[in-house]
Amino acid sequence: MTRDTWTFFRAGGFDQVKLTSGADLMRLGELDQKLWVALACPTNGLELDPRTLALIDLDKDGRVRAPELIAAAQFAGRNLKNADDLLKASSPLPLSAINDATDEGKTLAAAARRILTSLGKAEAKEISIEDVADPSHVFAGSAFNGDGVITALSTPDEGLKTTLGEIVACLGGEADRSGEVGVTVDRIDAFFAEATAFAEWHAKGEADAATVFPAGADGTPAAVAAINAIRAKVDDFFARCRVVAYDPRALAAVNRKEEEYLDIAAQDLTITADEVAGFPLAAVAAGRALPLDGTVNPAHEAKVAALRDAAIAPLLGARGQLSADDWRALLAKIAPYEAWLAAKAGPRVEPLGLARVRAILASKAKEELTALVSRDKAVEAEAASIENVERLVRYHRDLALLCTNFVNFADFYAGHQAIFQAGTLYLDQRSCKLVLKVADAGKHAAMAGLAGSYLAYLDCTRKGSAEKMTIVAAFTAGDSENLMVGRNGLFYDRQGQDWDATITKIIDNPISIRQAFWSPYKKFVRMLEEQVAKRAAAGDAASNDMLNATATTTAHVGAAKPPETKKIDVGTVAALGVAVGAIGTFITTLIGYGTGLFNLGPLAVAGAIVGLMLLISLPSVVMAALKLRKRNLGPILDANGWAVNAKAKLNIPFGATLTGVAKLPPGSRRDLRDPYAEKGFPWKRIVFLALVVFLGYRWFKGSFDRLLPEGARSSTIFGAHEASNATTATTTTTTPAK
């Protein structure tokens, strides 16, 4: 057999590749993907470490695809001295098993020793999953760890540490592999870009300081703040004055009415009351100036005073009132400042203050911080190898298991628990092994219904815990007679934990040939039971009606004519006659003398009965068998995010292994005495009497004469009697008359 030859095994109705060596795993890329059982699987909801699946999932889309599995197998195979070690599926990984003959392998081996040293296991000969579970401890206290994030540990310079902290404060930081918060080169560039923009914006204002800062660099912001605090009310006051100047009749309307003051006067007044604050800033009159003393609205008196002192006095000069023209001039004075303020750049660094921003820009902080990032990136390969060590350790344990549940379904068809099987459900004296976790039962059922299997969806809870999950179980043996929504069972997950399980949804399909065989008879019995129940209910209703009528008649004796006796319907009598005649004809045909079925012999009778049963059950059995042969695992898995590439059948023999039916243990004894058994119809006695009658009839017909002694034969007993009767008849005939 050449290296390029693959070996296949057949299970589930299709060919599956055998993976018997590490070389087979490494050359999975050479195997036609049409021969793979699956092409993708989800990274969650499986009985495989999700961290391992996440490492294989290179594009981080939540699914492992065939190319990613191929890459994982090649990575693991080339970094082990013996790729066959993957088939051992063991943990921990011996350091001596790492292939240090290549540069990649040497880096991995060095990284593995670094991890063990950081854990205080410098002398260890192997590395485990637990050792690589938290790589942050490897870099704890490390100045550089290759992730491109520098922290305060990356430099002893206090000035740089301060600047680095200011960058984090203004723009936020990122956690590096050690867990410390730091910055990347992108964040450094963004900070200095904002700092430069902020400084240049301030420089523009300073270049035209007389215009931009009419009240000085410190006084102008205060003046603008005072103006903006009362601006809306001042604009409102002058607008009202213009309205009155236009039409004096509006004077009463623009000033508040007397009734509104009466409503306010009835309350406890405060100068900040909302009712007062809504009134005009001062009494309105045509062409009136705004008074800047105490004759303004008391709710705004403080703001008017601030306007007078912080803005009007430094920009227009001290005065006791403000005209409309003065107000427009005041706004014109601050317009350049407001335009400059609207163009502000670098607002995130503003909290540092202009002086500090200029000091940072004047230093060499950017170059020095960028150099630190470069030093950190220089050890990226070594740091990345830490994650690759974790990858190798996990692949060493889990990769072969994934392949035998992805490339082929060897575990599933060998009777082992596959990674998609969540545990075992016990319900209705059965144990179901084909159980999967599902996120959305409704969505899953839409696809899984195409599998042709009898599926039950169950909600699972754990007593004393808030944990919940939904599972779907395939019933592949027994019958569905006692399965219904609301039934409770017990589910054991793969960790051995037990869950209370309740059926919430059922997809009905045939379960077994046995169920199909007896189905017609059960349907017939149910039909009879339903008809009997209907007749009984109708009879009970008629009886109640008769009792009511009798009671009514008795209560009105003589008051009404007695009801006439109901005559027998002729059609009913005819129908009963036809029915009785048909039954009689059937019985005559079955046991009639000379022509009955019983005249054919015991084997013929048994064969006829079996043939009749087959005639009744065969259509149901054939239909069920056709459906059972088409049961397919694919839709059940596809509904969970798999991409099953083959028609993985759950045929009748294999399906029977997935659901265990209750059986007594070998060597058990059964006591059939049941003190509480119901006294049913005496079938046994009737069958016994029928057998006695049948055997007696066959003896009378002479069927057993060849097996019996001379004196017990029917021909001997009845033959002698008939001969005696014949002699007597002859004598009587030949005696002459006297």
Image: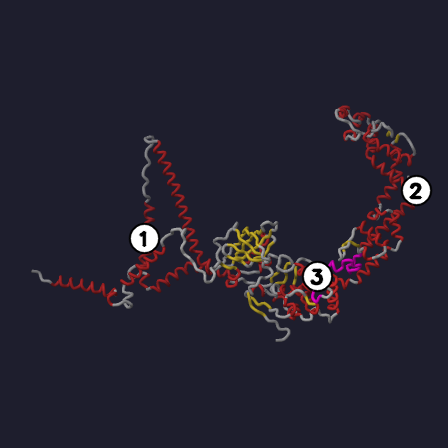
- Amino acid marked by disc 1: Gly
Q: Of discs 2 and 1, which sits in the foreground?
A: 2
> Dot 1 corresponds to which residue?
581
Which mark sits nearer the N-terminus, 3 or 1?
Answer: 3
> Dot 2 corresponds to which residue?
210
Q: Position of residue 102 (x, y in %)?
A: 74, 70
Q: Position of residue 627 (x, y in %)?
A: 50, 60
Quarter occupied by the N terminus: bottom right
Q: Secondary structure at mark 1?
A: helix
Few, some or many residues within 10 Å of mark 1 (<14, 14–19, 20+): few
Which mark sits nearer the N-terminus, 3 or 2?
Answer: 3
Quarter occupied by the C terminus: bottom left
Few, some or many residues within 10 Å of mark 2 (<14, 14–19, 20+): few
Residue range corresponding to the magenta coloring: 124-150
> Dot 3 corresponds to which residue?
132
In the figure, residue 402 lies in which quadrant?
A: bottom right
Residue 135 counted in the magenta span: yes
Q: Secondary structure at mark 2?
A: helix
- Relative height, residue 22 to residue 485 (above, below): below
- Relative height, residue 12 to residue 1 (above, below): above
In the figure, residue 696 lies in which quadrant?
A: bottom left
Q: Secondary structure at mark 3?
A: helix
Q: Which mark is residue 44?
A: none
Q: Label 2 vs label 1: CA separation?
A: 126 Å
Q: Position of residue 162 (x, y in %)?
A: 84, 52
